[in-house]
Image (tube, grey):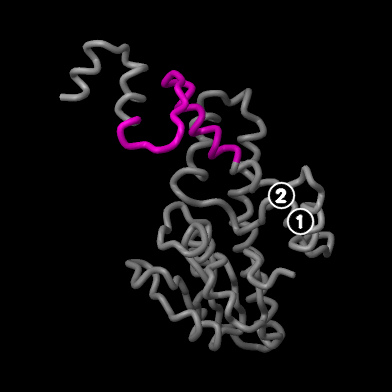
Amino acid sequence: MILSRLTSFLPFSEVIPEIFRKFVQGTLHRTNCKTAEMCKLTENSSRDVQIAFANELSLICDKAGINVWELINLANKHPRVNILQPGCGVGGHCIAVDPYFITAEFPMESKIISTAREINNYKAFWCAEKVQNAMLKFELEYHRKPTIAMMGLAFKPDIDDLREAPAKYITTKVMQSCNNADILVVEPNVQEHNVFKLTDYKEAYEKADIVVFLVAHSVFKSLPHNDRKVILDFCGIYKK
């Protein structure tokens, strides 16, 4: 009823702000539909590019023998520098997806956006390889297969959303690459999963020879660092 009354007197570009004004407390910024949609894609693509820079730094630092967390902390002391934190990739149904709408429509013009997507996708593959190499090294040294704890499946900390989660991809790839390995999958924000058998995070940490931190869930930060375990910290649980 409200919509029909408004459309009688106002052009369509004026209708939506009038409707939203009835329940939105914040400022409404008017623009056309194309710009509004591009704005959403731009916001998420911008985040993807910024995360890609942090992830690329983590790859460089791993080769150079530099603590990436310390490096970023020092670089961010510059008043005009604000580098994000690296992780094991980018997930979710927005940041990991929206850039493709731009790159598909404008492939020649979206070089940075496209490369950022490649970097963030590669980071998950790289993490999986690091886990596989750690498993092989452990087996060669101790002459037995290790128990591995894959810590986290969500696409970001302290949520139960697993959509497009790089941690889920890494866990699957590790499980597929090894026969008869004892892999404990942890996601404290999910009660059960139809693919992965989930283990309590404290139990998994206690049993594991190799602990792989994939998501920086708050509860993981209460776990004491154990030097007797091989710890692969891809999300900065023990960053200094």
Return the mark for residue 72.
Answer: 1
Describe residue 140's horizontal placement relative to residue 77 as left or right: left
Q: Quadrant of residue 62?
A: bottom right
Give the residues drawn in magenta, as a range.
Answer: 21-46
* Depth check, front residue: 137 or 52: 52
Q: Is residue 55 left or right of residue 223?
A: right
- Residue of label 2: 83
The picture quadrant where one finds residue 159 is bottom left
Q: Amino acid at mark 1?
A: Ile
Residue type (three-letter) at the residue carrying disc 2: Ile
- Residue 56 x, y percent position in the rendering: 72, 50
Residue found at x 81% / y 57%: 74
Disc 2 element: loop
Question: Would you place residue 118 above or below residue 229 in this image?
Answer: above
Residue under the point 55% across and 30% down: 103
Residue 137 in percent (x, y) is at 70, 77
**Residue in view at x 39 percent, y 70 percent:** 196
Whether the residues at callouts 2 and 1 have beta carbons within 8 Å, the answer is yes
Disc 2 to disc 1, C-alpha distance: 6 Å
